[in-house]
Amino acid sequence: MSRIGVFICHCGENIARTVDCARLAEESGKLPGVMVSVDYKYMCSDPGQNMIKRAIAEHKLDGVVVAACSPHMHEPTFRAAVVQSGMNPYLCEMANIREHCSWVHTDRELATEKAIDLVRVMVEKVKRNQELFPIRVPITKRALVIGGGIAGIQAALDIAAGGHEVILVERQPSVGGNMARLSETFPTLDCSQCILTPRMVEVARDPRITLYTYAEVEEVEGFVGNFKVKIRQKAKSVNADICNGCGDCWNKCPMKKIPSEFDAGLGYRTAIYVPFPQAVPNTPVIDREHCLKFLKDKCGVCAKVCTRGAIDYEMQDEIIEAEVGAIVVATGYDLYGIGKEQPNERWKGYGEYNYDTYKDVINGIQFERLLSASGPTQGEVRRPSDGKVPKSVAFIACVGSRDPEKGIEYCSKICCMYVAKHAMLYKHKVHDGQPYIFYMDIRAGGKNYEEFVRRAVEEDGVLYIRGRVSKIYKDGDQLVVVGADTLSDSQVQIRADLVVLATAMVPHKNAYEFAQKIGIACGSEGFYSEAHPKLRPVETMTAGIYLAGACQAPKDIPDAVAQASAAASKVQLLFSSDELEREPIVAKVNEVTCVHCRNCIRVCPYSAIDDKEIRDRHGNLIRMVAEVNEGMCMGCGTCVAACPSKSVQLAGFNDEQVFAEILALGHE
Amino acid sequence: MRFSIDSEQLESGAVKRVEEMIQQSPSVCYQCGKCSAGCPVHYLMDIPPNVVIRLLQMGQTDRVLESRTIWVCASCNTCSTRCPKEFKIAECMDALRELALATGKDTPSEKDIKLFHREFLKSTRRFGKVHEASLAAFYKLKSRHFFADVGAGIKMFFKGKIRPIPHRVKGVREIRQMFEAAGYGQKVEQ
Ligand SMILES: Cc1cc2nc3c(=O)[nH]c(=O)nc-3n(C[C@H](O)[C@H](O)[C@H](O)COP(=O)(O)OP(=O)(O)OC[C@H]3O[C@@H](n4cnc5c(N)ncnc54)[C@H](O)[C@@H]3O)c2cc1C
Ligand code: SF4
Ligand code: SF4
Ligand code: SF4
Ligand code: SF4
């Protein structure tokens, strides 16, 4: 005979407005097996929880139904409460009379009837609930960090400093990411390389960090604490263990006119190359798409000049398998291009700026390269077309961003700041030059950011013009920029020698596929989704996978670093215990009745089921059955539905429980 | 309105002159609009005060010097008092009036206002403070607006606000010296 308690919550007015809670309590009290049924304004509050705890002791309850909000919201709260009274947490269930009832109905009478049904269903289920105990799985205390920009570097260093092993995977030949390409950084104008390169070196030197550059993550399997990953180490064609980075090979390589990715196309590199002089590691890779040896089986100069014999044209891609307990995704961002060709059908490009056909219309990263002492012009601002020092430069904010017509609605958040920085740095380099900034709003909400922008205006003579640019056209060797200034109610034309576009920060073009590959979600614009926009900003919905940096949303360096450190501390929190407790809601195969048809093995989306041999005492194989790996089962129940001999049951949701619920619904 | 901007305009003499006169650059203004919001004669202006400053920032001095606004401005200082960036708008307006007169770019349509200013200063120079009755008389003679505001004048007279006989203040010599020192001694009389 069951002894069930029913506890009905008003949720303030949320439930009580549409459901007659007093009547619900009265009707629930009449259900067979219910010993006590009460209602209260806020069940989740301290007095509410105490009510439940007291009732368990007083009425010697062996099951609890809380009729309130969604179990997503408060199941952990109420289960923790019953545990304090010595009850197994899985004997407490919630009937959702808010999301499933009061919030979606208006007729009080009918809503109350439905709430009574929902409670009855849960009461019938709880009567059949069994005590369940958390599953303990070991944790592999090694982390994988994907992406070696500033966010990935920071996360890797922090986790390593916590005493754990880290695998850092970067798909470029060097770590550093976009920050390595920047000149000076707002709002302090410290040199980007100077603050970044020491950290890059540290990442390579830390014995706890294994660094794979020119590598990509191919596959992620498993679950929190126990991921199995496959990493593809692309063939560098250079044996990094032997190479000492002398540079003889890249100095001699005849393929000298390959546009440098690092310099955003403004400079050149060779086929065998390190992306920039301060690269980490400082050993080259051969870009096989441009190398004569691979294209035409000619040349081979690099192998000839390399005194250490480090060049290896036969080198193959390698798949590295690793086990890790946690993953930090720090894959960063890309920039929107204004060209006709777009990576998706939502984005359009800027025909009014003549797409990307004018040489002297460049983007922010290209301007960073022009400003950078290690850039293609050694830090002199010279325009790409003819190398002339531009005497007037128009900077245009919000290109792509905040432009629903072009397919991007969001604000890229950082460009307001770097546009001010660009205009300022330009003025510092070209004293008689005039910087103009076309903008819609100046969003400078950070520590010392507003002050920085005002400095650009008041001290460096940057002229802000409030309006979007409607057109750019060429006239002689100058560009005519046609805009508006809504502040003076006027149309404005400027003749510029150079135009710099602050193009939107966008996710990588394969971000969606990558998210699917590693099992996380991304929003409609393609940035990876955090578990909760306010309260869980660095976790994903997949336990054990965390986010850092601009792959989650446009961010500047301070924010990227802060998030990276936060992700690292989440990883360390996870690694602080040896075992992980998992919900025991998993499938179990009845070995007596299993006929080994292998249906379940085929349908399980998490590959959680395997073959198991049953042997006698002497080791002779008797027969085969299916076996669920409790660590990997996610409790989806697919196997239960697929099993023809009804040999799989899901704990907490077994057939008896589910049928009882259905029958309870049809009781009248 | 439509215009091109180039660095020559931005560096133009006129903006520099204003900067020198008020010892402040219009670039400090961030276009919040509070000056225009509080200006009591805004409704009479062709360009609101904040836009005057905006146009200076953009090097469009001619537009400003030709505007009605700089003459309508009553120098009440509400704007300057309230400006969050402490920009001296009223002083700037004053500087612009001077510049307009000096460059001959001033609006012909606002000649009455200029006339009034002149008569006001003349009267001040002569008596050490304004003598309303003679100021009104001279102004009316020269502007030929004989009957405007007559009602108000009569009311003021009966309230004792207008003295028929001018009263010379004690320090009138010093006040005249001030006019000379500022280089306006003879100019005012012209
Ligand atoms: C023009 C411009 C100027 C800027 N100026 C400033 C400034 O002055 N101050 C400031 O604070 N911020 C500035 N920023 C912003 C700054 O660049 C970013 O905040 C910062 O780079 C974000 O770091 P991240 O590590 O998140 O991303 P990234 O720097 O993009 O690094 C991501 C890394 O992940 C790698 N990666 C990507 N996908 C994979 C994959 N699938 N597998 C393995 N590796 C992968 C990439 O190769 C890259 O190395 C500027 C940005 C721009 C565009
Ligand atoms: S073999 Fe390829 S990488 Fe080496 S020098 Fe020749 S072109 Fe360059
Ligand atoms: S940060 Fe500024 S420039 Fe960038 S999209 Fe937002 S408003 Fe536009
Ligand atoms: S319940 Fe789902 S995850 Fe678990 S074994 Fe069955 S199919 Fe696989
Ligand atoms: S109140 Fe000051 S800052 Fe605001 S618009 Fe006027 S002058 Fe500019």
Image (spheres, coloured by chain):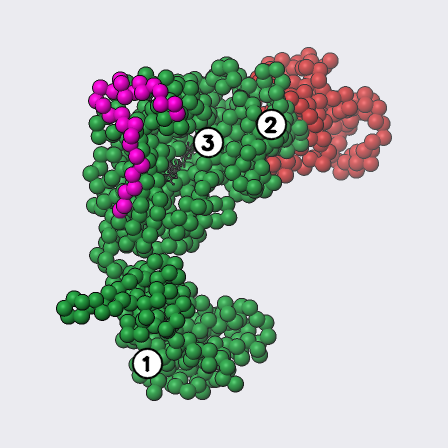
Chain colours: A green, B red
Pointer 3 with pointer 1, Cβ within 8 A: no
| Local crowd size for mark 2, using a 10 Å CA cut-off: few (<14), some (14–19), many (≥20) | some
* Rendering coords of residue A329 (x, y %): 36, 45
The residue labelled by disc 3 is A418
Q: Which mark is residue A354?
A: 2
Residue occupying image coordinates x 53% and y 79%: A113
* Rendering coords of residue B110 (x, y %): 75, 24
Label 2 to label 1: alpha-carbon separation: 74 Å
Residue occupying image coordinates x 67% and y 37%: B40
Subunit ID for the residue under disc 2: A
Span colored in magenta = A295-322
Mark 2, mark 3: which one is toward the viewer? 2
**Residue type at mark 1?**
Asp
Label 3 to label 1: alpha-carbon separation: 63 Å
Mark 3, mark 1: which one is toward the viewer? 1
The quarter of the picture where the N terminus of chain A appears is: bottom left
* Residue A256 in sight: yes
> Element type at marker 3?
helix
Which quadrant holds residue A225? bottom left
Residue occupying image coordinates x 64% and y 22%: B4
Which quadrant holds residue A29? bottom left
